[in-house]
Amino acid sequence: MAASNDCNYSATSIGHGLVAGYSAGICGVMIGHPLDSIKVHLQTGGRAASGTSSSSAAAGASNDQIISRASSTTAANAVPASSSAKANMSTSTAAAATPKQSALISESTIGKRSLRALYAGVTGPLMTVGLLQSLNFAIYDTVRRALYQRHLHSDKETSGVGHPDDYLHYDDLSNVALASFAAGATLSTLTAPMMIVKTKQQLMVWGFREAIRDTYTGGTSAKPNPLRGLRNFYTGFGLNFFCDAFGRSLYMLSYEGLKRELARRKDSEQSSYGDRVSTQILSTPDRMVCAASAGMMCWAFIYPADVIRSKLYQKSLTTQSSLTTLDGIKMAREMVREQGIRSLYRGVGITVARAGPVAAAVLPVYDSVLEWVSS
């Protein structure tokens, strides 16, 4: 292929990926965010309710600290109370801290705030997810194109398949896995700050700025060190990297694999190259079924890491020390030892249920918009 064509392909494909990714991202947020809020409350509210006596005591102390931080945030500009009123308030708060405190907080939040509570933390994703998904799918699409084009140049047998634009239907599934891994790994550096801010908003029903300020300062009134403040946004980064990179790789690999298998079953006589088949014959409902299945498989795989990520973000509300991925691994071991392996799958039902409709909307929208702008 000529150099001019290569340049045209790269500029055009990036633009197409940006448009398709933005459209898919907005659809995903509006459909999935309410269920994501419920998932976070289930993940972070379960340990205190079902742990051992030692873990329950620790959870009660943690909940005291969370309530204290939430109260201090909302009362920052209020008139100071008298010392006796403060003492009474502290006593009542301590007395209210029970092993079921987290579950009660979750129930009251969702029950009293209704739809608003379920959309707590949606501001950040709405502001950023379009851009992030655009960048994500642009990287994915570009890497996938490049890998397929390289394969075309190195394998003369593919000359009968077509040209580089056929990558959407004829490339190897290994290309899909590598391209999606590269996209997820790159985006994980941007999604990590967004995830911890969003989780704090969902847990505390804070505003966007409030959650950012708490994360940067670590919940203290003292002026933070800029480097440490930035590091707070990358709490447990290894867990986020695993969810984004490995999760997205499995997500897109499953989606493409299911589409090709369904296309092969629907029309066994269509022209193909080797084990590669065209998915153009699939209808939108077909794609939605494949996408929903891929999303559910992906979340079932990464869910334990997502639970620990949420718990680590919750713990950051009660400590001023920087938490790392190793702290998350240690937390996972303690949870399994005290509560069993099921503790890592708390809330998995609602998450898998959420993954189905969200993926059924996101990936077919991406496919349809990409094919439309490319035509």
Image (cartoon, rainbow, N blue to C red):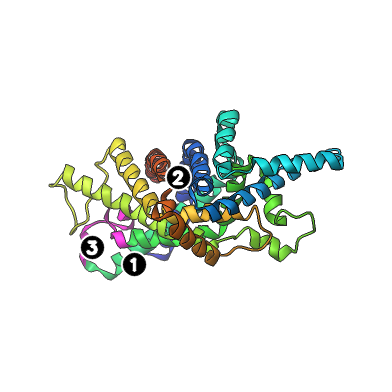
Q: Say which quarter of the image contains residue 229.
A: bottom right
Give me the disc on residue 158: 3
Q: Is residue 228 above or below residue 367?
A: below
Residue 332, can we see it?
yes
Q: Which residue is mark 2?
A: 20
Q: Classify the position of the C terminus by image quarter.
A: top left
Q: Classify the position of the N terminus by image quarter.
A: bottom left
The front one of 203 and 297 is 203
Residue 209, can we see it?
no
Estimate the x, y position of residue 290 in percent, counting from the top left: 30, 44
Nearer the observer, disc 1 or disc 2? 2
Q: Which residue is mark 1?
A: 150
Q: Is 240 left, or right, of 296 in this rendering?
A: right
Among numbered discs 1 and 2, the one appearing first in the sequence = 2
The residues bearing labels 2 and 3 have C-alpha atoms spaced at a distance of: 28 Å
Label 1 sits on a secondary structure element that is helix
Estimate the x, y position of residue 106 in percent, counting from the top left: 56, 38
Q: Callout 1: 10 Å neighbours few (<14), some, many (20+)? A: few
Residues under numbered marks 1 and 2 in contact, where contact means CB atoms less than 8 Å apart = no
The residues bearing labels 3 and 1 have C-alpha atoms spaced at a distance of: 11 Å
Our reading of the magenta stretch's main secondary structure is: helix
Estimate the x, y position of residue 236 in percent, counting from the top left: 55, 61
As for residue 312 lying within the magenta part, the answer is no
Which stretch did the figure color magenta?
157-174
